[in-house]
Image (spheres, rainbow, N blue to C red):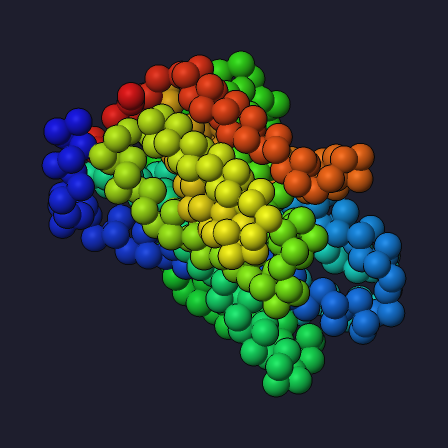
Amino acid sequence: MNDRLSNLFQSADDVPRTVRTARVANGIAFVILGAIFATWAVRIPAIETLLRLSKADIGIALLGLAVGSVLGLIASGVLVARYGAKAVVRLAIVTYCLLLPVIPLSGGLYSLLAVLAGFGFGKGLLDVAANTQALHIERVYPRQIMGGFHALYSAGALLGSLVGALFTGLGLSARAHFLVLAATFLAIGLAASVWLLPPDEDDADETDTEFALPSREILGFCLIGFCALLVEGIANDWSAVFLEGAAGARPAVAALGFAAFALAMTLGRFAADRAVDAIGPRRFIRLTVAISALGVIVTLVPIPPVALLGFGILGFGIGGVAPVNLSLVGRADLERSSESAVAAVSTSSYAGFAVGPVAIGLLADATSLRIAFLPAIGVAAVIATLTFTLPGRGGSSPAVRSD
């Protein structure tokens, strides 16, 4: 514990300059990951009108996005193992950014489905490649830094949504909006990617390039990722509906539910790195899921300001679980490569993000929305229990110790 506390005040001055610049460059990749997706998400109504699609059509198109994302997550593990995270980050940024302005040019549902599948594929590629690069950078640092990368993803999503709201208010078309953001982030991302760390030649021969399904050694990490993103997905998709329906909030107040959750989650991720250095990653996850469970309980109070506070508490608690879980994967003593493990955990996590909101909807139809939120407390307990089953650490940064 004393070693962890001392590392809270340890600077990165001894870290090579190439690694510090790589940290900045990879942080930019995480900002792009969040900002580009938010740019698309805030203009979905405009795309729906532009292409004359129904709500059902949009649902089908979003399925293409989900499938493409999963395929990108799987492919990225193989590509990163073979060519290195730096090359795949650059490829992903090009794919992700170039396909954004193509979305409004789609001629109808089926072309939109295809474009969104490619767009999702680019997102999945960037997700795994940026996280793998983050693990390589973190190994050289004297302290945990993964939470900061994920906080930059949330900050990027917030930036993208705010710019989207501004451009929408100014009457800028989705085509012009997407083109401006894509060109800007493509130029910034490619310029910054020059500073990313190259692949470690010593590990090249030992790295497997085959994608494998989650094995017993990483099953605990996959389940934690699934459960954490399941809870995140619930809050993302149901916060406004819950506040207006179950808590009786006015629409203007209900709309703040996601903002409160997203802002608190960003703050929680920025705080995660220091907290992990102080108490260790497993204790950190147990503490934060307890905070998350408390947040769910507070949301159930049928008083709008209290329920709104509950979503903030939930976001602050659950926000750090996914990045710390990935950091643990990167430091665990595994038989498979870290690239393959990160891809498998990321894919499992995304499945939770997709399943959670659907499960809540089905349960709410059968009971009520307030009752449908209760299982999230049990999910938090499952995450805490799973931390006792994780394998021990292998090579890691000196600041982060097993607990």
Q: Quadrant of residue 321?
A: top left
Query: Residue at left 21%, top 53%?
Result: 17
Is 100 left, or right, of 328 in this rendering?
right
Is 93 left, or right, of 19 in this rendering?
right
Q: Quadrant of residue 366?
A: top right
Q: Quadrant of residue 204?
A: top left
Quadrant of the rendering where the C terminus is positioned? top left
Residue 85: x and y in percent read 45, 43
Query: In the image, is residue 254 above or below residue 212?
Result: below
Q: Nearer the viewer, residue 190 or 112?
A: 112
Query: Residue at left 61%, top 68%?
Result: 252
Is 286 left, or right, of 182 in this rendering?
left
Is 243 left, or right, of 331 in this rendering?
right
Query: Residue at left 70%, top 45%?
Result: 66
Residue 145: x and y in percent read 31, 44
Q: Nearer the viewer, residue 32 or 53?
A: 53
Residue 365: x and y in percent read 80, 39
Question: Looking at the image, can residue 382 be seen?
Answer: yes
Question: Looking at the image, can residue 85 be seen?
Answer: no
Quadrant of the rendering where the N terminus is positioned? top left
Query: Residue at left 53%, top 14%?
Result: 216
